[in-house]
Image (spheres, rainbow, N blue to C red):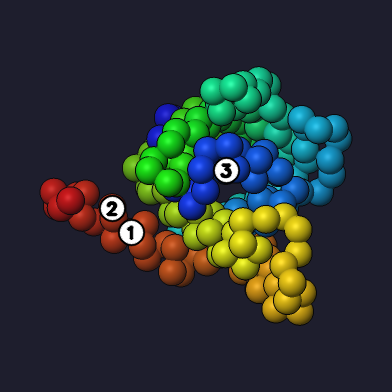
């Protein structure tokens, strides 16, 4: 299953590249995601929790940067994970590339996703999984933008440390919380209904 996603970062490409390559900093921006171990500068263990309909899934696994082209701002990585309850697993090959978009940066993501075990039954609803991925990327982009706004786009603390800490903590709590099976599910369902009836 191939999934294409895109989002914008309110920074020029060189600055956006530095932020997006700081995995420990941006991981909390992905809903339901958590880094559990840093093996080396290119390899990370973690988990991500998602909900598809009534089913809550957690994948625990490893992600590794396979190739990093800093000159062209292009990255290729692989990831694999399994559900601890034995319901199957997932493997993905992901690439993302940065392009200038005015004063901002457009991030283009291509994912080749393979599901296995009982989890693979959701592959029959490829459109729903694609829509879920789009929603996750949208939430990630919003959380990242909130983090950059709170920190002024700079990893160093701003002068008002108490305000900065409060904002950053708020972003992290929002990002690390499990993905909402209600609000996110309703949005995905609505997209699927519009597609079924030929809506845009």
Tell me the CA gap for discs 2 and 3: 32 Å
**Position of residue 65 in the picture relative to residue 51 (left or right):** right
Query: SS at mark 2?
Result: helix
**Position of residue 161 in the picture relative to residue 114 (left or right):** right
Query: Who comes first in sequence, dot 2 or dot 3?
Result: 3
Residue under the image location 53 percent in, 59 percent down: 145
The reply to whether the C-beta atoms of the residues labelled 1 and 2 are less than 8 Å apart is yes
Query: Residue 186, image x and y in percent?
Result: 37, 65
Q: Is residue 5 visible?
A: no
* Front residue of this view, candidates 77 and 192: 77
Q: Which residue is mark 1?
A: 189
Looking at the image, is 195 positioned above or below residue 65? below
Tell me the CA gap for discs 1 and 2: 5 Å
Residue under the image location 45 percent in, 54 percent down: 138
Binning the other alpha carbons within 10 Å of mark 3 as few (below 14), some (14 to 19) or many (20 upward) gives many
Binning the other alpha carbons within 10 Å of mark 1 as few (below 14), some (14 to 19) or many (20 upward) gives some
Q: Which residue is mark 3?
A: 16
Determine which quarter of the picture holds residue 166: bottom right
Q: Nearer the viewer, mark 1 or mark 3?
A: 3
Query: Residue 73, image x and y in percent?
Result: 56, 28
Residue under the image location 76 percent in, 64 percent down: 157
Number of on-image labels: 3
């Amino acid at each position: 299953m191939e999934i294409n996603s895109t989002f914008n970062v309110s920074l020029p490409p060189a600055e956006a590249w530095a932020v997006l390559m700081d995995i420990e900093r941006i991981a909390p921006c992905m809903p339901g995601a958590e880094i559990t171990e840093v093996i080396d500068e290119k390899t990370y263990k973690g988990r991500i929790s998602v909900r598809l309909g009534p089913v809550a899934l957690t994948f625990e696994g490893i992600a590794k940067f396979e190739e990093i082209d800093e000159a062209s701002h292009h990255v290729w990585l692989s990831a694999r994970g399994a559900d601890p309850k034995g319901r199957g697993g997932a493997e993905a090959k992901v690439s993302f590339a940065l392009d200038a978009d005015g004063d901002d940066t457009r991030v283009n993501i291509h994912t080749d996703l393979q599901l296995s075990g009982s989890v693979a039954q959701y592959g029959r609803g490829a459109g729903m999984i694609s829509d879920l991925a789009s929603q996750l990327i949208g939430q990630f982009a919003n959380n990242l933008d909130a983090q950059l706004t709170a920190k002024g786009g700079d990893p160093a603390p701003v002068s008002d440390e108490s305000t900065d800490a409060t904002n950053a903590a708020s972003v992290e709590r929002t990002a690390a919380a499990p993905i909402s099976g209600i609000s996110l599910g309703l949005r995905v369902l609505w997209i699927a209904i519009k597609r079924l009836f030929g809506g845009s």
